Amino acid sequence: MSYESIAYANIGLFSENDSAPLTGTISNEEGIFSIQDIKTGKYRIKISFIGYQSVIIDNVLLQPGTRELGKIALEVLSENLDELTIVSTKPPMTYKVDRKVIDAGSFPGADAAIDLLENVPSVQLDLEGNLTYRGEGTFKVYINGHPAANGTEKLRQLPASRIDKIEVITNPSAKYDAEGTAGIIQIILKKNRLEGYAINTSLKADTRSAYQWMFSIDNKNEKNGWYLNTYWSGDVWEKYNENSRQTIIDDEITYNTTSEIKSKHGQTNSNIEMGFNYDLTNKDYIDFSGYVNPTKTKQKNRKKGWVTEQITNKNGETTDSTYYLNSLYNCNYQYVGGTLTYEHTFKKDRSHLFSAYIDYSGYVTDLFDRQYDQQIYDTFTKREGFIGSEHQETTIEGKLNYKIPLNKKITMETGAEISTDHIPEITSKSGTFDANKNITKYDDAPINQIVDFIQDVYSPYILLKREGEKMAIQAGIRVEFTNRRSDYSFENEAGIRVTTPTRNRFTDFFPSVHTTYNFSETQQIFTSYSRRIQRPNYWKLVPLEQYETPYSYYTGNDDVLPSYTNAWETGFKKSWDKNFISTEIFTRKTMNVTQNYSHTSAGNMLVISPENVGQSWSTGIELMGGAYIFPWWNANLSASLYSYKLNINFEKIQKTQKQFKTDTRWNNTFLLPKLFTLKWDLKYNSPYQSAQTKRDAFFVSNLALKKEFCEGKWIITVVYNDIFSSEKYTTTKTGEGFFIKTQYKEEPYFSFKLAYIFDNQK
């Protein structure tokens, strides 16, 4: 029979003749506990947990050294009770030595994985949709220990109902892929080895016309199991109003453009995932999962509103024109993929282990995207945009890992990893559309632009870890060899294809060091260092010219260099019962900071391209704490207070931008009578600044009420997002010859979710 670890079990230590405990502790999340500083003698140990038979171990001789009690099994109580209601909660956020752990079940208002990350104060979505940490950097996304291609996209798509917890690892060891200058976000999906069936289904809708249906079934027996997950959704990521004013000065002509726009961004998506696991022997395990989008994923960004253009010449003469903008961006694609994992344990405690996995994903149908903008004047309609595609993209991730204890205190871990991303053909055509949506390229645009992109990364690594009674130290080194090709070609006027090949091969070294010292089971200090890389993705590198708005177009830059970050952290954590407090001091230095940069072009146009704008520093302190103020009120407060400095050294610009950031988050959980649970969170995002853009601070608060029925089998959740209608801010973007000021106001909304849970696993 398989067993499940019990977290927070109570352990009491008694003398042989006393009924009152001398001391005690609780088990951690892995079900492990330790009692220290005990005099030599014989004792009685009692292990108990609500809903289980208590276990008492008599005549335990404790003397200098370590006494292992082995695995202790608790049996479920079989008494028949008339009525018993047990309500338990986990802290929404806990703190481990090298990571922050977010409990997904503590945030019933979350729709997707990316919503759960709103609960880490220093993790933010920047203005370009990238997840950043402490002012700079991007994350690599892992799912159940494996790197995920198109990570931020997966965070938007993965339903929160499927997630057990999210780990934010800001200083990963050399065992992990070095990609992502901010570290790793690891999603741990719900999974167990309990025997029986677990069935979950839910239906959700909100006042923005979003909807989501999810169904999952999980079956386990003693040696194997299988599961099925499926969902169908029409997500709305954001719905907001924006008022903008843009000024561009070109050859003594001033262009003023004002707009009042309503925007709505989201996608329709469906997914079916099936998997199984099987214990081949007592020491050999396999786990396989495969997924497919049965229908195409369809992203849709729509903007509608009025735009006024004013042109002033050098003599002060002005001409005005007004049109109605109807803008629609579509992106359609369909994926299939699978992951196979194998493990061989040489010892039951997994201290000697070999593991391997391979993950594949690719398009079922090619990606197609289109921007179609209609500028509707009184007497005519102008249609502009682009059509693009990506053909036959495939990504493969593979890894071998071997861990062996060298002696009682030292463990070595070594392995190798490969990551590939191949897109044989990327195309884009910008121009004007006719009434039937057929496109004609601009007169000065290249003909039949195509990019062939390949990136392969090969990575061996080695780790050594020494664990003592109080102190542990781990050091490792990772080597990554990158082979990248980005060949751009187009047809000249004679119909001959002209190719500009781009090759880049480079090798990098990524060391990491982690140390911890445990004063006791509940107090510890730690320090860590790691070096990370952020390679520019293919879209930043390919020099395709692509329409973006009536006043801007985007082009890649194959001269962009990778960004590198050196990160140091040290901190202290203390916990008692289910309460904790921690403080962390950190500094991060990033070289070759990459940001989208805008330049003026002919007339009323901007050119946007990625550039290495300089280097940045983030230095500060992060404070976190969680406590049960009353048995019915749990509160978690977290704050990042840090200085962010960006030294810009780009083209002829040399300047330093400084800001002090104070991002905070306060989460509250109230256990009310009649199985009601109230969640209230408050978040403050301090001002944001990049090389050209500034954003105001803003405050937002959400409220969720959950009610359980029929012994927890049915759950209703109602959420009010942005209860104070305070999610509004202003951005300003400045550069040589232009200025843009935009006011944003996110639309508050209600959501309603009905869920059903059946679980006979034990």
Image (spheres, helix red, strand yellow):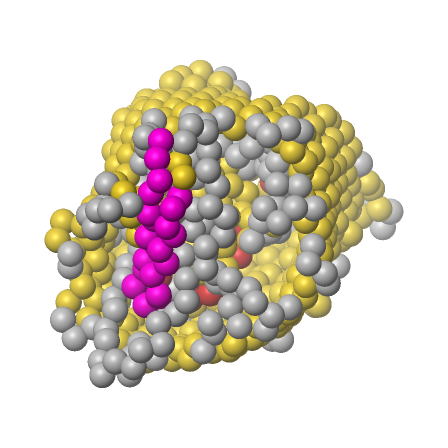
Q: Give the residue at x 56% y 53%.
A: 144
Can residue 340 be found in the magenta stretch? no
Q: Nearer the viewer, residue 119 or 16?
A: 16
Q: Nearer the viewer, residue 512 or 342?
A: 342
Q: Is residue 287 visible?
A: yes
Can residue 41 be found in the magenta stretch? yes
Judged left or right of residue 150, residue 233 is left
Q: Quadrant of the rendered structure where residue 621 is?
A: top left
In the rendered image, the vertical position of residue 220 relative to residue 487, given as above or below: below
Q: Is residue 249 visible?
A: no
- Magenta stretch, main secondary structure class: strand
Q: Quadrant where the N terminus lies?
A: bottom right
Q: Quadrant of the rendered structure where residue 203 is?
A: bottom left
Q: Nearer the viewer, residue 40 or 489?
A: 40
x then y, percent, for residue 589: 46, 22
x then y, percent, for residue 234: 45, 72
Q: Give the residue at x 45% y 78%.
A: 760
Residue extent of the magenta highlight: 40-60
In the rendered image, the vertical position of residue 315 relative to residue 357, given as above or below: above
